[in-house]
Amino acid sequence: MAVIKASRGAFGSALFFSWIINILMLTSSLFVLQVYDRVIPSSSVPTLIALSLIVFILYLHYGVLDFVRSRILVRLGRRVEEILRHRIFDAVAFLALRKQNNTGGQPVQDLGTIRQFLGGQGSIAFMDMPFVPIFLLVCFLLHWMLGVVALVSAAVIFVLAILTERAMRGPVAQADITLGKANLMTEEARRNAEALHSLGMKGAMRKQWIRMQHEALDLQTRANDSGSRYTMLSKVFRMVAQSGMLAVGAYLAIKHEISGGSIIASSIIMGRALAPIEQAVGTWQQFLSFRKAYERLNRVLDAVPPDPERMKLPDPKGILEVDNLLVLLPNSDKPILQGISFKVSPGQGLGIIGPTGAGKSTLARAIVGLVQVTRGSVRLDGATPDQRDDDERGKLIGYLPQDIQIFDGTVAQNISRFSDAPDPAKIVEAATLANIHDFIMRLPHGYDTPLNEGGSRLSVGQRQRVALARALFGDPVLFVMDEPNSNLDADGEVALDRAIRSSMKRGAAIVVVAHRPSALQAMDHLLVLTNGTMAAIGTRDEIMKKVMGAPQGGQTNPNTGQQKQQPQTITAASGSFQTTEPSKRN
């Protein structure tokens, strides 16, 4: 991962401190050696005091350096997370938009796993590993037999570490996959709680979720049991090796091949040589999680490269051009849209109609850059969506989708698109134009009233008006509205028509996808889609007369003298649909 390579300076500093720390770890063994071989035979108290003072100073340096190394590693993990945080957020949002990978929030969790490992004991164990040969060499310097015992002990514990990895690799990987699916199911259940309860699906979904959780727990238990078995063997062998080193040292001392101090010193040195390996075995689960998280993040970041730097383009006037548009489903040869071409100039409005499944919503999403275009182009003042930064392009567009999305924040934040320093007058202006200002003022804290995710404290129609105000905020040059009146009452439809006409008068280009004709009153032209192709396009009056085959007005109410809208059936080539009901998703 490039960010870790970019942090090699911090890694180098940590390794440098590790080198000094491991050298200082020889202090205790050398102190024992000097006490047994020099102080006790000479009965020299001044020598003992001098050695103790030196050892105290060295221990103090060891503690300070170990503290500094820990701080470096903690900040290294934090730096990696801070550098990658924005890319991970963008990647998760992009993959969710394209529906290319059911990652959910896993990359965010993986980033936390990497940070914790880099700043924890696991990374320290692996940093100390390269210094094991130094301690083994010291054992060989004391006596070759002591070196052999230490080397064999280190090799056995290293083999146990490899066996631990092999035993845990498969179950841990399968457990991660299963837990990921269970987490996605949990998120889906939370998002679709109404359907879950109202359709009696809760029990069935709960059974599937419990089954996945149980499977993941079984796999994790199996992995932990395997790891614990080898960890136990490693600890037992460590004690056996420690005692074996003392026994061999005692034998060599009896044979007068080493001194009495070398017995204790060799035991301490071998213990230090085995410590990183044993610690690595103990933290192997963390290392496996780190490695899996690293691999998953690499795949996600490779699939979603960083946005390139783009030259700032001049503000557009609002000329929308769609040229020979073709959109295909992923892994399919069947087009959702094909041969779509039209132009909407500033101050003009285009209504898009057609039967359910004709591709109307897909066309709306392609216009705002949410759908990947297979062939052809969508241009705003000559620029395709990828020629502008996502946030820059988004500020130019007022988009009102079928599925209204309210975020966890205040009313003002939702309307202002969570701008850092929005103009309060612009927020009120947008809310007033959407005919929701009076309602907002009656809320407990007005525009500062917090809204939960999904806007649960608002009705469906109120959520649609808040979303309409959000689309109007900032005077965008292009409006794209998908079934904007599906949940609006009569007053709401009047407000919608007023907002559309006001935006057109201001010079914005308008595209409205609708089943109900009341949302199309202000449109200059209509486009009829059938099976993803253009069945007809022309002025509103021409299409209403020639294609739709329905009267534009209604029967007059004898009591009020006003026209009463009648249920109308709009027919377009291969299908028909009722205009009095909200549409379904295309």
Image (tube, grey):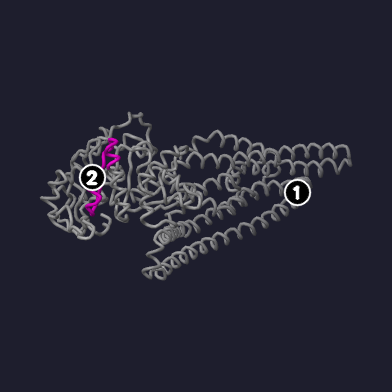
- Indicate whether residue 417 is drawn in magenta: no
Residue identifier under label 2: 522
Residue found 47% across the figure and 63% down from its top: 216
Q: Residue 568, image x and y in percent?
A: 18, 58
Left/right of residue 269 with respect to residue 569 in the rendered view:
right
Q: Mark yes or no: residue 156 visible.
A: no
Q: Residue 7, image x and y in percent?
A: 52, 36
- Amino acid type at mark 2: Ala
Element on which disc 2 rests: loop
In this view, the residue farthest toward the left is: 546
Q: Nearer the viewer, mark 1 or mark 2?
A: 2
Element on which disc 1 rests: helix
User: Does residue 100 sit above or below 31 in this rendering?
Assistant: below
Q: Which mark is residue 485?
A: none
Would you call the spot at circle 1 few (<14 residues within 10 Å), some (14-19), or many (20 or more)?
A: some
Would you call the spot at circle 2 few (<14 residues within 10 Å), some (14-19), or many (20 or more)?
A: some
Residue found 46% across the figure and 65% down from its top: 215
Residue identifier under label 1: 264
- Amino acid type at mark 1: Ile
| Closer to us: 455 or 158 | 455
User: Does residue 53 sit above or below 196 in this rendering?
Assistant: above
Residues in magenta?
Answer: 501-521
| Closer to us: 45 or 493 | 493
